[in-house]
Image (cartoon, rainbow, N blue to C red):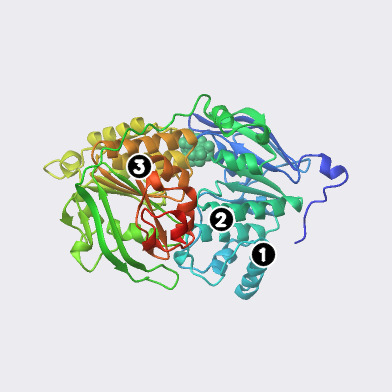
Amino acid sequence: MGGVVDSTGDAAAEPLLEVRGLSKIFGTLKACDSIDLEIRRGEIHALLGENGAGKSTLVKMLFGALEPTAGTIRWKGQEVAIRSPGEARRLGIGMVFQHFSLFDALTAAENIILSLDDPAPVSAVAARARELSRAYGLPLDPQAHVGDLSVGERQRIEIIRCLLQDPELIILDEPTSVLTPQEADKLFDTLETLRSEGRSILYISHRLEEVKRLCDRATVLRGGRVVGHSDPRRETAASLARMMVGGDVPVVVRDKPAATREALLEVRGLNRKAGHPFAVSLSEIELTVHAGEILGVAGVAGNGQGELFEAISGEALQESADTVRICGHAAGRHDITGRRLMGAAFVPEERLGHAAAPFMTLTQNLLLSRYRTDARAFLGRLGIIRNAVVASAAKRVSTAMDVRKGSEDPEATALSGGNLQKFVIGRELDRQPRVLVVNQPTWGVDAGAAARIRQALVDLAKGGSAVLVISQDLDELFEICDAIAVMHGGRLSTPVPIAEATYEKIGLLMGGARPEATSGLPLEETV
Ligand SMILES: Nc1ncnc2c1ncn2[C@@H]1O[C@H](COP(=O)(O)OP(=O)(O)OP(=O)(O)O)[C@@H](O)[C@H]1O
């Protein structure tokens, strides 16, 4: 690729990007408050901060997606006004967002073309995408439809479309939150290759271990201000977390599980044909979650976790009503509302667009998901919306989950990613569901907020509910679950009780060790 910075000579000495006094005010909220930041050539620079600290706002200003209220940006020594993402790309700044902006019905190559400032034929773009995919270790089929791809695969499209513009600075917002440990390792290799070419990377992540491993320098934001710079390699994950939240991060407290034998969620012989060529078929899935229990489902992305969630939540119906039972009711022929009315709650993986309507307020979103289950409270006997009741429920959720927001009732899209996640989970927990099924509960959530969400799941189970957690974060599953089952190729292993689970054992199952042969067996017998 051309355009790589010469890291010798005078140009190398001056920062690639220099930000002075950059501020962004939304209404009365100073999302970024007089930020100073310098990015050198060929460095991976971490941008750290708890949810709502102002990281996304800052990088959106650098990428021309938001106009600063005050301050200056210098690019290679020249003051610039970056008025649009197109201008940012022309300067050499690329960005991979936390929420992908891809069209499901189009192929990877077609999506890439849409973002190009100079349109090119599909075949040429597909060929170039293949080339980049090989060069940077980012496997991708340019002809695949985005709707059929896992989140990890979608991210690769975003990265490749960013690389096609030959950027000198690449901004990555929470890139590993959707990846398995192995996928994340591959991404780190890619990033190290980019650094060795003299490109710079501004790296936002809540995963402090990976920041220590990968990043050369870190800038920490709190409440919109820079509160420190550090060399992450000299810090511990705990010391970085303290710098971010301004205090110690809470530890999840798990009393001895109070599981009973009352089965609240049962799945029997669930088979589901793949709906399209890239989807995963589900095969003979069996699971039971008892009252008081948290069952974890681990797995590499794209092994059927999304399809399992759809089948259990009622987004996809089963042929037989008995395939899914919720609180003793045959639920297989009921849709998501029907299953909610049986006492279940569901939190899908994608919070913006799926779990929450972006341009509706938090209160409207709460009403949208709960107007049937909470009809009496929210609509009353006459079926008229009781705005004050709904608004007070939204407020209760925000307080319980410590949702930080700029105004009383903002649109979902105005919340930072982690804060929206806290709201979506809190909205469901507020109903005290007897069964909760949640897919990736702490995606993009900072350490303090993740602990809060995990504690809430633990407390829900402690109160006698059954919780099914689908997660790619093994640390999370080990922290809160009573047992972990693994999805691989559309099959679910027998759950491994937490006392017998090790990272190696679960890792082997994730890699495809015989699922049926694992329960309680020593490691050697599972391969
Ligand atoms: N368009 C907007 N309108 C109003 N307020 C906004 C808007 N975008 C962000 N905010 C507010 O600005 C603050 C900073 O949000 P930002 O998304 O930059 O945080 P963040 O550090 O990226 O958080 P996260 O780690 O959760 O993604 C938050 O309080 C957020 O609610």
**Left or right: where 118 falls relative to 368:** right
Question: Would you place residue 64 above or below residue 398 in this image?
Answer: below
The picture places residue 490, in percent across and down from the top left corner, at 39, 65
Beta carbon of the mark 3 residue lies under 8 A of ligand 1: no
Q: Residue 132 — which label?
A: 1
The picture places residue 495, in percent across and down from the top left corner, at 35, 53
Along the viewing direction, whichever of 290 and 141 lies nearer the viewer = 290
**Left or right: where 300 falls relative to 321:** right
Along the viewing direction, whichever of 398 and 210 lies nearer the viewer = 210
**Left or right: where 492 falls relative to 325:** right
Query: Residue drawn 37% across and 71% down?
Result: 275
Q: Residue 417 — which label?
A: none
Distance between mark 1 and mark 3 Cα atoms: 38 Å
**Which amino acid type corresponds to the residue marked 1 in the rendered image?**
Leu
Which type of secondary structure does the marked residue at label 2 adopt?
helix
In the displayed orientation, state which residue is furthest to the bottom.
Answer: 123
Q: Examine the rendering and report whether any part of residue 224 can be seen.
A: no
Image quadrant holding the N terminus, namely: bottom right
Q: Write down the residue under mark 3.
A: 425
Question: Would you place residue 36 above or below residue 302 in this image?
Answer: above
Which type of secondary structure does the marked residue at label 1 adopt?
helix
Distance between mark 2 and mark 1 Cα atoms: 17 Å
> Mark 2 or mark 1: which comes first in sequence?
1
Which type of secondary structure does the marked residue at label 3 adopt?
helix
Q: Quadrant of residue 476?
A: top left
In the displayed orientation, state which residue is furthest to the left.
Answer: 381
Distance between mark 2 and mark 3 Cα atoms: 26 Å
Q: Write down the residue under mark 2.
A: 183
